[in-house]
Image (tube, rainbow, N blue to C red):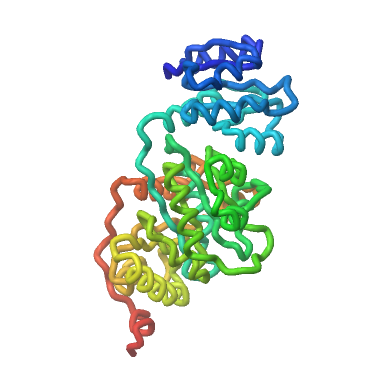
Amino acid sequence: MGLKVTVVGSQDRELEAVLRACGATTSMVPITELAALSQPTSKQPDVVVLDLREHPSVPPGLTALKRQHAETGVIIVAKTLDPDLMLSAMRAGANECVAEPVTQGELDAALTRIAARQSAPAASQAFAIVGVKGGVGATWLGVNVATALARVATAGAVLVDLHVARGEAALYLGVEPRFTVVDALDNIHKLDEAFFRSLIVRAPSRLDLLAAPDGTASSRLDASRVRTLLEFTSKHFEFTVADVPRTEPGALDALEGMKSIVVVTTQELPSVRSATVMVNRLRLRYGKERVLVVINRKDKHSEISHEDIEQVLGAPVAHAFPSDYRMTLEALNKGRPAVLDNHSSLAASFEKFARSLAGLKIEKSDTPAASGWLGRLAGRK
């Protein structure tokens, strides 16, 4: 990788060897040298690796270092990912935290993310996922799409769960967040990278999650605050995926920065009826080209076909995800996104759609064909 790395506060030659195996050029200095590195005229390495395994807390010199040299990357090495220590480190300006056993893979991933931030920033892309009604699987789809994007991101991916009336993304990802999106929205005036990273939790495959509360929120979402939050994540992450509740005007009216707004439906008459209302509303607000429709749990034997839905909505279906009840149930029970299973058609479908959102070619649908239920939906006999 060619990065210049200064290891601070460590005599662990094995750590140095692992960094060199990652392609870094290393030097080692005692923790007392952190103050010298913080001087305005001090020549900076690309990355400082601060070894805190033998230290009880984050040294104050880290804050001074980041204040003077914001571009210097900082990786914390700790015995465990203690929440209080991580919070202190992130607030002091640390970019990454790794814990024992320190592996080459973890360090290489951390160095790669720091290098990506220091180079020309990747073009950020943001996507919204909206279900047309309860039970269509929009959150599950969003979790898997965001996880797939995190696997290909060089500058990070974040999933923002805006379901303040009890969201489920954290459950589906198998993580237990200490803070939620409500904390971010309530403190939107002091939102910066250090504070934001203290609120999120790391999920599988490098995905960061800003979770929804476990209980019901007492107030509605404010569109201006949601808009500010999504603008912030777009500046600091390569990919933002927002899980948007269909019943929250404060979220639906704050999606100007989205590259695509994905409307999730199923092949059931109530879902398709709701999809027509939702799609028309979002098209009027954000433009036809930005609103995509996808079918979840596709059933080739359903009376309502893929082509029928296209004819009713007046636009191609961007993607149809296969139905795999057994695999989905197993993945949900494990708190592990299905896209991490590389040996299923469902995982491949999530991966393919995520890549299409990120700029790859979207498959075109077949020519629409009429069907008997269309007259019922359109009010004809």
- Residue 291 sits above or below residue 273 on the image: above
Q: Position of residue 113 (x, y in %)?
A: 47, 31
| The one of 171 and 344 positioned closer to us in this rendering | 171
Q: Quadrant of the N terminus?
A: top left
Q: Farthest residue toward the bottom?
A: 381
For residue 169, say whether it is visible. Answer: no
Q: Classify the position of the C terminus by image quarter.
A: bottom left
Splitting the image into 4 quarters, where does residue 48 fall? top right
Residue at the location (49% across, 54% down)? 229
Between 184 and 78, which is closer to the camera in this rendering? 184
> Is residue 364 left or right of 223 when viewed as pictured?
left
Residue under the point 60% across and 11% down: 29
Q: Nearer the viewer, residue 73 or 177?
A: 73
Placement of 302 over or under 126, stated as above or below: below
Residue nearer the viewer, 268 or 176:
176
- The x and y percentages for residue 316 are 29, 63
Quadrant position of residue 87: top right
